[in-house]
Image (cartoon, helix red, strand yellow):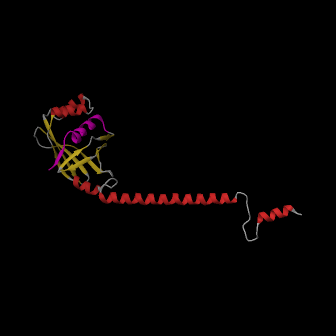
Amino acid sequence: MDTERIERALREGPPDEPVYVPGGHRQQRRVLMLAGLGALVTAALLVGVAIGVTLNVLRASNGGVGSGIDVAALAAELEGTWDSTELSVASYRSELVARGHAAEDVEAAIANNGQFDRVRYRFVFAEDHLQIFAAFDGRAWESMSGGPYELQEDGSLLYDDIGCFITATFTIGNGDLSFTPIQTRSCNADETLNNAAFFNLVNYTRK
């Protein structure tokens, strides 16, 4: 009797049935489980993306977190003439020294402007140009500096004071204009001091 042939026939089973492979059932089950897991992960990712897109749309429509800044509208709101509050020489001196400027540089700036007792500043924003004026002790306005400016995508102001670049964010509300502490690039000590006085020691009101 050919026992090997009988065993082979038993393993193969009827001709119309799949051939028996040791461990084949477990492998097939593992493949099906992996395929199912992959489908679930893909579905979860798609749902997450859909939720994220929906939240961003809602935030943008409501003007909340993630909404863009209308730079053109902000620039239009900034255009015009703004006059500052009055600043005493004592406040000028103490504020600048408190902000880290050397006392001798502050005294030199006061001397250069005629030993004033009080000062007011004026900003004129017109056609992408900023002109800065000062009125010392109630006298006529004098031009102090000027140059091109532009608003960045985040709404901050970038002002080019003849190669000294000033960056600051600002707030406009109820006709008032104020700036956050300036950041400078390619500016010497005098330029940094003067622009700190223009932008950060006073607030402005639309003229």
Give the left or right position of residue 6, taking residue 123 as reference: right
Location of residue 2 in the rendering, given as x and y in whole percent from the top left corner: 88, 63
Which residue is depicted at the point 12% across and 34% down?
117
Q: Which residues are magenta?
A: 187-207
Closer to us: 48 or 188 = 48
Q: Residue furthest bottom?
A: 16
Q: Nearer the viewer, residue 46 or 85?
A: 46
Instruction: Return the x and y of residue 145 as percentages of the image width and height.
Output: 23, 43
Q: Is residue 202 magenta?
A: yes
Q: Residue furthest left?
A: 138
Residue 33's place in the image compared with 156, above or below, is below
Image quadrant assignment for residue 29: bottom right
Residue 93 position in % (x across, y down): 19, 32
Residue 200, relative to residue 68: is it above or below?
above
Q: Which percent across, then down, holds residue 74? A: 26, 54
Query: Can residue 95 be found in the magenta stretch?
Result: no
Q: Considering only vertical position in the picture, is 132 above or below 15?
A: above
Furthest-top residue in this view: 104
Determine whether, in the image, residue 8 is placed left or right of residue 167: right
Looking at the picture, does residue 102 appear above or below residue 150?
Answer: above
